[in-house]
Every structure is written in structure tokens, then in C-alpha cells.
Amino acid sequence: MDARIGKVLLTADRIAARVRQLGRRLARAYAGREPVLVAVMKGCFLLAADLVRAWPGPLDVEFVSAESYAGTRPGAVRLRVPRGLRSRIAGRPVLVVDDIYDTGATLAKVCRALEALRPAEVRTLVLFRKRRAPARTGPAGAARSGHRRPRRRTRPAAVRPDWVGFDIPDRFVVGYGLDYCGRYRNLPYLAVLRQGR
Ligand code: 5GP
Ligand code: MG
């Protein structure tokens, strides 16, 4: 196996079982309606394919693509929305599906862009969510009085996913659609990427 692949956090079987369960729950939640599932590419391609096959019910599928500029401009996301999407989602319930939720910046940006296209509603699902230190809301002036500031940035409160597959440790992970420099998307499981040298 590739030396960069570390601990397997979620096996292919566990992921498959959870995705099937989510598919059934979504079908119930959207019973009587015909939502548009908007998958955030590229990381979401396996999830989208598995989720729609586990979803017994009418739905349509659309794609947007998001790229984050980690390193260069932290938090900056480049989003591409296909022309003509407005006419396909206007007035309809939209479910945004993304692979992983870290700071929430990507999901927030996607939701903002889609809201502008006047859907009936926007709800969200992420398969993996990183566990982060909770926001510390200490007494005002805590920073000034010498308390250490939280090590991690806290999440913007803007978008909280409506459905979450798994909460995972705050590590860089690959597999099941998630890449590192364009590799490892095809791994059927989710694993930690080992530090390289
Ligand atoms: P956020 O915008 O929530 O901070 O991060 C979400 C995006 O960053 C994801 O859609 C994904 O593209 C990327 N990302 C965040 N954490 C990881 C990770 O552990 N592994 C990989 N491969 N991508 C990640
Ligand atoms: Mg992504």
C-alpha cells in the first residue's frame, strides 16, 4: 500500500451502510416532493453516485464545483456554477451535498450562490464533519487580560449541515472522493494522510 496512507478511519463497508441509511432518511424527509440534489464536485462524486442509488424517490441531480485555495488564501473558495442552473432549481427544494465540512466556508459559499437562484429552500448534507475545538466564548476582554486565545479558528455560524454522515477527528483525510494533490480519490475507504517529507 502507499506509504502516505495512514490509519483507516472508516472502512468501505461502514461508509456504504451509512450512505444507504442516509438515502432512506432523505427519501422520507422529501416524501411527496421532488428535490434537486446539488453535488459539490469533485470530492463528492462517489458520495453523490452512492447516495442517489440509495434514495428511492424522485429527484434530479445537478453539479457545482468548488476548489479551496488552502495555503495561499486560507478560507478562499473558487466556485463554479453551470449556466442555466437557475432555471433548473428555481422554486424547487435543493439539497446541497458535500464531502467534508471543515471550516464551513465552502458550504456557506455554495449555499449563498444557490440562494441567489431562488430555490424554494436550501438544505445541506455532508458526509464527513471534522470535530473541532468548540468556540470559546469567554468573558469580554479575556484576550487582553492575558488568557490564551483558542488555538483553532472557530467555525462561522452561517451554515450548519442538516445531515451529517460521520464526525471524524481533525486530521487531513483522503479517500472516498477526497484527494491530496489529485490522488487517492479512488480509495474506497477514508484514511488519514501521513505527513510526507
Ligand atoms: P471548508 O470550506 O469547510 O473549510 O472545507 C471544505 C473543503 O476543503 C472540502 O470540500 C475539501 O475540498 C477540503 N478539505 C477539508 N478538509 C479536508 C481533508 O481532510 N482532506 C481533503 N482531501 N480535503 C479537505
Ligand atoms: Mg469539497
Image (spheres, rainbow, N blue to C red):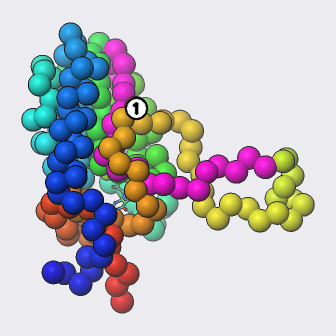
Question: Residue at coordinates 40% horizontally, 32% vertically from top-left?
Answer: 162
Residue 116 placement: quadrant: top left
Nearest to the observer: residue 117 or residue 101:
101
- Relative to residue 32, is residue 127 depicted above or below? below
Q: Position of residue 55 (x, y in %)?
A: 15, 29
Whether residue 78 is visible here, answered yes or no, is no
Question: Residue at coordinates 64% horizontally, 65% vertically from top-left?
Answer: 151
Q: Is 122 included in the stretch rendered in magenta?
A: yes
- Relative to residue 141, is residue 97 depicted above or below? above
Q: Is residue 12 left or right of residue 141?
A: left
Residue 181 placement: quadrant: bottom left
Q: Is 166 included in the stretch rendered in magenta?
A: no
Question: Residue at coordinates 30% horizontally, 76% vertically from top-left?
Answer: 6
Q: What residue would you read off at disc 1?
A: 162
Crowd class of label 1 (few under 14; some 14 to 19; many from 20; radius 10 Å): few
Q: Position of residue 164 (x, y in %)?
A: 36, 40
Nearest to the observer: residue 13 or residue 184:
13
- The amino acid marked with disc number 1 is Asp
Rendered-image quarter of ligand 1: bottom left
Magenta region, residue range:
117-138
Element at label 1: loop
Q: Position of residue 193 (x, y in %)?
A: 32, 73
Viewport quadrant of the N terminus: bottom left
Q: Is residue 131 left or right of residue 139?
A: left
Question: Residue at coordinates 42% horizontally, 66% vertically from top-left?
Answer: 171
Q: Which residue is most to the right?
A: 145
